[in-house]
Amino acid sequence: MRQNNENFSDKVKEQTDIVEVVSEYVNLKRTGKNYQGLCPFHQENTPSFTVNPDNQFFYCFGCGKGGDIFNFIMEIENITFYESLRLLAKKNNMEMPNSKGYSKEYNRKREKVFEIHQLAAKFYNYLLLNKQVGNDAYKYLIKRGYTEKDIERYHLGYAPDSWHSLYYFLKKRDYDNKILSESGLIGNKNDNYYDKFRDRIMFPIFNSQGEVIAFGGRRLNDEDNNSPKYYNSPETIIFHKSKNLYGLNWAKKGFRETNSAIIMEGYTDVITAHKYGLNNAVASLGTALTLEQAKILKRYIDNVYIAFDPDFAGEKATLKGLEILKKADLNVRIIELPKGEDPDDFIKQKGTKEFEKLMNNSYNLIEFKIRSVVNENESYNINQRIHRSKKVLNIISQIDDPIEQDVYLEKTAEILNIDKNAMKEALESFNQKNKQENDNENRIKEKGSKKDIDNLNYQDLLLKTLIDNPERIEIIKNEISPKYLEGIYKKAFSLIVEKGFNIKKMNIEEEIEDENLLEYFMILTVKERQKVSDDKFEALIEMVQNDYKKRAKKMVYNKLKKAKESKTEINNLLRDYFEILKI
């Protein structure tokens, strides 16, 4: 795939500053000539993620991920090479070549589905603003407090109460039935094609680059009980519900400014939040948060506020999602909304400052979980007290701070009317169990920590200077051959000599199949540029030659000792020995 785009991708790469792009996702700090930060691809407390601006390359010494700017964008945005090329070309105001002949069938299909969604968004938006067709939907949104400017900004639309409006619109633009079905917008029953979204207010769902990838449609007629209130796009080649967040494209700037995200339930919640200045709001596309969504959030922020309807917030699936956020090393707090209110209504009625007060008074995850088990305004019978006390003890045992444990323990004992000392004894057994589990988990986490390559040996240094200075490769060809080196050094040297001046253009992740060689090459590439004078370069060559001489002479000497009395065999070994001496 990348080979087909080689000329254009090289131009894009030349125009792109890897430090500038990576800084949009990672807080980088300069260390010498390189930049370092916390890796966005795994959890860590000490920075092991390094960006080398000279070689336009990144590498994490913790998890081993590395590559050029395309590899970074593909990994962090979960997109293909072709899409990363489009994204970076757009950032540099460069026009993409005609995709025909550039992408394989899979990528061509993705491009078409992207095009269909972009056209559909424009189609729905036009109909909503057309007072004849979308008048009822338009009035509904105005009544809910949205303006025409909001409709345009958030690309809201209306799918008419028709079976074929979008279908005919797209067919006129020469899209075949197969790709229309695969887009998720057009249904097919016995070769009868129809619009899946009908008589609905349409909310386009965007990816992080602001491209339409799906839709959510709200039923306009609330009296129609034959169809769901909300109908969402199915999963397609460009849309995976668990890997996206509604509003992420608008919230990225707010994430950077606040180091936090507010996760809400619905599209209107997010739109209202942004309209009122809460620019870090996103929706989870379902209350059950996923690991993929947690990873996306962790790339940008450290703190998460949950603003779900109280009825949904206590559901088992929701609590599981909150645990996932915690495991992604995010600081989770839960906003307590008044019963029966959602963020959309609350913000409209009481404003941004009142919502921010709710954020300031939010509960941490432990508090929230305890409150979901016991409530000081309720009374419990004996069985309930026993059952709930055990559930709370299990929650409190997850706290490391003994003082914090004691505070929650005392409060719970008071609510359930149980002796605090009895609960304390029960807690000790929980603590012992959790301590063993945590010790095991920490041992696993400590495995494979940052590799120490600060002190390069002479072989590393020689190979590093060849990568940084490809013009020296021609010089070394006459002085050293691959046999002079062993193991990983021999493999790396052979590859460098083979690539020559194209060594910096090489896509190492695609072209190196040997995992050990790939990891070693990544480390060398991201390592800060080394100053190696011509004299030092010659000295490095001499060191490799001398090292080879010692090994080769020892090998020949051992063979001579074991050689049979054949004159031919002995003469051959002696010839080899004298050849070595000439080096």
Image (spheres, rainbow, N blue to C red):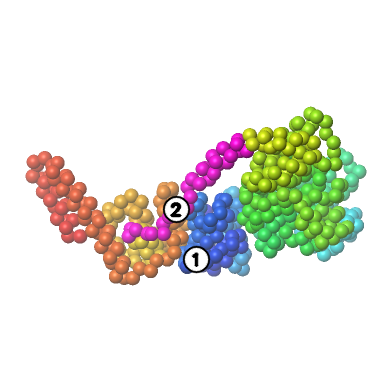
Tell me the residue at 47%/47% (across/down).
448
The answer to the question of whether label 1 and label 2 lie on touching residues, with beta carbons closer than 8 A, is no
Toward the top, the furthest residue is 383
Please tell me in which quadrant of the rendered image residue 310 appears.
Answer: top right
Query: Foreground: 557 or 333?
Result: 333
Q: State the residue position of label 1.
A: 31
Whether residue 522 appears in magenta in the rendering, the answer is no
Judging depth in this view, the residue of 569 and 311 nearest the camera is 311
First to last magenta residue range:
431-459
Of helix, strand and loop, which one carries label 1? strand
Instruction: Give the amino acid type for the residue marked by disc 2 in the picture.
Output: Lys
Quadrant location of residue 299? Answer: bottom right
Q: Position of residue 531 (x, y in %)?
A: 38, 69
Marked residue nearer the N-terminal end (1 or 2): 1
* Quadrant holding the C terminus: bottom left
Identity of the residue drawn at 68% across and 47% down = 404
The amino acid pointed to by label 1 is: Thr
Residue sitting at x 34%, y 56%: 493
Give the CA distance from mark 1 to mark 2. Answer: 17 Å
Q: Main secondary structure of the magenta part?
A: helix
The residue lying toward the viewer, choosing from 472 and 224, is 472
Graded by Cα atoms within 10 Å as few (under 14), some (14 to 19) or many (20 or more), the crowding at tag 1 reads few
Is residue 434 part of the magenta span, yes or no?
A: yes
Q: Circle 2 is placed at which residue position?
A: 451
Query: Considering the numbered disc 2 on the image, is that residue within a helix, a strand or a loop?
Result: loop
Coordinates of residue 500 in the picture (x, y in percent) = 37, 62
